[in-house]
Amino acid sequence: MKQHVLMVAWMLASAAAQAGTTPEQELAAGRKIAASLSQEGRDLCVFDNGAPSDMPHQRVGDLKVAKESYGGVKELLPRLVEQALAQKADAIVDYNSSQRFGFWPWRLVRPVVTGKAIRWSEPPRKSCEAMGGVRMETILTTNKSPEAMAQGAVPQTPAAAGSSASAPQ
């Protein structure tokens, strides 16, 4: 019981610390992270589900990055991009980002991002967005996951996200 109370207190304190961040600060942080990536990393196409059926591809590896303590998913994305580019991936499919319990669930919740790296068998004839994907730069600059964008949230272009003072979270 004492461990449960400590876990709840810790989670509330962490949430309160995170709540001190304004949407503008979150977007600025995302723009900063996106700017730190290579152009190839910013253009990496991310699909919430599998790749489009009309685009032949091969899977080149599994991707997983995690933080050992509380935090946001956004700060893990550069490591995910590094893993994908190291495997010479053209896109990431089956992207999933979440907060998960660690080995000792009463101690911490941590961010985890997974996906599968793929390489196109032939160059795509359509843009990432036309294929149903989202560019990594858009994920970072809008602070929205591909899943959230697919559920009706309209993605902003990086230029629009940069000029907007407050985007919906």
Image (cartoon, rainbow, N blue to C red):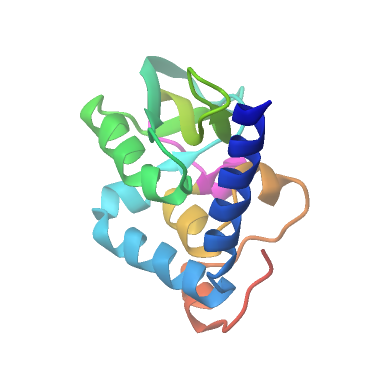
Residue 142 on the magenta segment: no
Quarter occupied by the C terminus: bottom right
Above or below: residue 11 compared with residue 169: above
Q: Main secondary structure of the magenta part?
A: loop
**Left or right of residue 139, residue 59 in this image:** left
Of 83 and 99, which appears nearest the observer?
99
Q: Residue extending furthest right?
A: 152
> Residue 94 placed where, x, y %?
56, 26
Q: Residue extending furthest front?
A: 2
> Residue 1 placed where, x, y %?
69, 25
Marker count (numbered): 0
| Residue 4 shows up from this direction | yes
Above or below: residue 126 compared with residue 58: below
Residue 133 on the magenta segment: yes
| Residue 118 shows up from this direction | no
Q: Quadrant of residue 53?
A: top right
Q: Which residues are magenta?
A: 120-134
Please give the name of the residue rendered at 26% of the width and 37% of the height, measured from the top-left corner: 82
Please give the name of the residue rendered at 77% of the width and 47% of the height, measured from the top-left corner: 151
Q: Quadrant of residue 8?
A: top right
> Residue 72 placed where, x, y %?
48, 49
Of 154 and 56, which appears nearest the observer?
154
Please give the name of the residue rendered at 59% of the width and 40% of the height, measured from the top-left corner: 131
Please give the name of the residue rendered at 59% of the width and 64% of the height, measured from the top-left corner: 19
> Residue 75 placed where, x, y %?
38, 50
Above or below: residue 148 compared with residue 153: above
Of 10 and 91, which appears nearest the observer?
10
Above or below: residue 94 compared with residue 17: above
Q: Quadrant of residue 87?
A: top left
